[in-house]
Amino acid sequence: MRRLTKSREEIYSCATHLLRYTANLSYDSLCSAEIFPKVRTAVSDSPPTRADLIAELVTDAIPGYAIRVVQLNSVVATRLGVTDTDVQCLHALDRYGPATPGVLAKRVNLTTGSASRMIDRLEAAGCVRRIPDPTDRRRVLIEPTGDGIARVSAAYAGLIARTRDDLAAFTEDEIQVLVRFFRAAEHSTAIAAHLEKGSATGL
């Protein structure tokens, strides 16, 4: 229980540090008890069970981290003059490489019309450009610009540096567990998003 609580607090501290770094927000307004009250955990003399640990991770630590990530993406989007979804698009392009508008729409769960407007915004902001598909000159690919990636990377530099510092307290085995967990969580989240989208559209 002590290790899990420490990890949760480190995650909160890491995200909070970046929000202050990128948005220059005051700590009081960002982390006041009124806005983010400290989560109460059950007090027990007995060691936590596996179910207790999973419950704390799934219902507290992960949602808390997700809230901070959403906040951060919003701050970055505002600085770039685009929307939160546009920032997701830049992340997808940086991670998976250039894509057609149709493929890009699927990666960020948008309709083709919404994706087209998103691309227009990002292009106007100097973050992406349209290039011919080298395998099919009739098609167009969307790729991130060097300036776009540099601006996004700069916004997340504080988080990356702080996370590296936080991970210094973890062993290699613990880091391997974290990597394994986040890979699995990414896969599960992708499946959940697909199923929810299908449920909403009646597919």
Image (cartoon, rainbow, N blue to C red):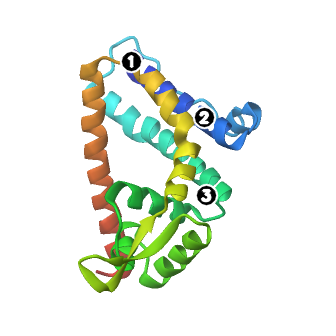
Asked whether, in this view, residue 182 is left or right of residue 33, the answer is: left
Disc nearer the start of the sequence (3/2)? 2
Identify the residue position indicated by label 2 in the image.
Answer: 16
Q: Residue 3 carries which label?
A: 1
Disc nearer the start of the sequence (1/3)? 1
Helix or strand or loop: what does disc 1 sit on? helix
The amino acid marked with disc number 1 is Arg
Identify the residue position indicated by label 3 in the image.
Answer: 77
Asked whether, in this view, residue 182 is left or right of residue 7, the answer is: left
Marks 1 and 3, how far apart in space?
A: 34 Å
In this rendering, which labeled residue sits more in front, label 1 or label 2? Answer: 2
The location of residue 185, given as percent across then percent down, is: 30, 46
- Quarter of the rendering containing residue 122: bottom right
Q: Residues within 10 Å of mark 2 (few under 14, many from 20)?
A: many
- Quarter of the rendering containing residue 53: top left
The location of residue 101, given as percent across then percent down, is: 39, 78
Q: Are marks 1 and 3 in contact (CB under 8 Å)?
A: no
Helix or strand or loop: what does disc 2 sit on? helix
Q: Which mark is residue 84?
A: none
81 and 61: which is toward the camera: 81
In this rendering, which labeled residue sits more in front, label 3 or label 2? Answer: 3
The amino acid marked with disc number 3 is Ala
Helix or strand or loop: what does disc 3 sit on? helix
